[in-house]
Image (cartoon, grey):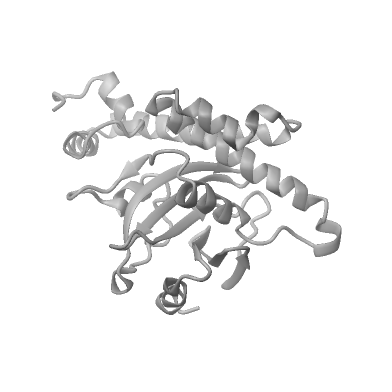
Amino acid sequence: MISMPPSVNDLHAYVDHQLNDVDRRLVETYLAANPHIAEQVQAWQQDAQQLRAALSGALQQPPNPDLDPSVIRQHLKRQSRRHLASAAVLLIAVSVGGLSGWQAREMTMVGATPPMTDAMQAYRMFAQQGILPADYKVTDDGDMQGWLDRYFSRANRLPNLANSGFKPVSGRLLSTEQGPAAMVMYEDQSGRKISFYIRPPGPKNNLLPRGSRSDGELQAEYWSGAGYNYAMVSEARDPATQMLKQELRF
């Protein structure tokens, strides 16, 4: 357990999500009583988000064989967990950017990139391939909504899928062309997965109407609200997908 008042290292560990739940609550209580320190910590958090967003500059780079997913996975296995978490931001930006680059060639024919392509790509990478560890995992006393509120405090609440047997178990911070994003993974007792994805609408404020679309083996239900775009992604043939539509009233 950390000592009070927290040191600078403790505060940076809080920003980097390296504290356990007990220490995190101690720091949050301290920050609530010390607004000037809380303001500095908030600035650090904003800097971290801007850094993740800046990594999307890799989208402008030419194709690089070193970024092949199989090569990246072999390299990441030799790195520490902290390096893995940082690489996750770059990996999703490069992967989504590469896919968007190919779609951009067809935009004159189809008019626009299909909605929430990045949400589906994130599901493939993290739910299906399990490339990198989560930034946050729910424990017995964990609070996934509280974790998400640190980065998207004015966003819609996490969908409650308890009636369908799914509960949130982990979260990841990502970077996209539109800005910082997050994905929350839901699982049921049999290990089936559904993801909740949130990101800003981008510089052009591309908010979405409520809709659905499929892409290969995946199905996405998407919508906008409170200034953000959202998507719930699941396996198209999974019976849970139909239950998801009913839960979200699509």
Q: Is residue 168 above or below residue 94?
A: below
At 41% across and 29% down in the image, what residue appears? Answer: 44
Rendering coords of residue 158 (x, y %): 37, 61
Quadrant for residue 157, please give it. Answer: bottom left
Q: Is residue 30 above or below residue 249?
A: above
Q: Is residue 152 visible?
A: yes
Rendering coords of residue 209 (x, y %): 60, 71
Q: Is residue 203 left or right of residue 31?
A: right
Q: Is residue 233 left or right of residue 43?
A: right
Quadrant for residue 8, please give it. Answer: top left
Q: Is residue 50 visible?
A: no
At 33% across and 42% down in the image, what residue appears? Answer: 136
At 48% across and 51% down in the image, what residue appears? Answer: 128
* Foreground of the two, 138 or 77: 77
Quarter of the rendering occupied by the N terminus:
top left
Rendering coords of residue 59 (x, y %): 69, 36
Quadrant for residue 23, please give it. Answer: top left
At 58% across and 63% down in the image, what residue appears? Answer: 217
Residue at the far right: name it.
108
Rendering coords of residue 31 (x, y %): 24, 35
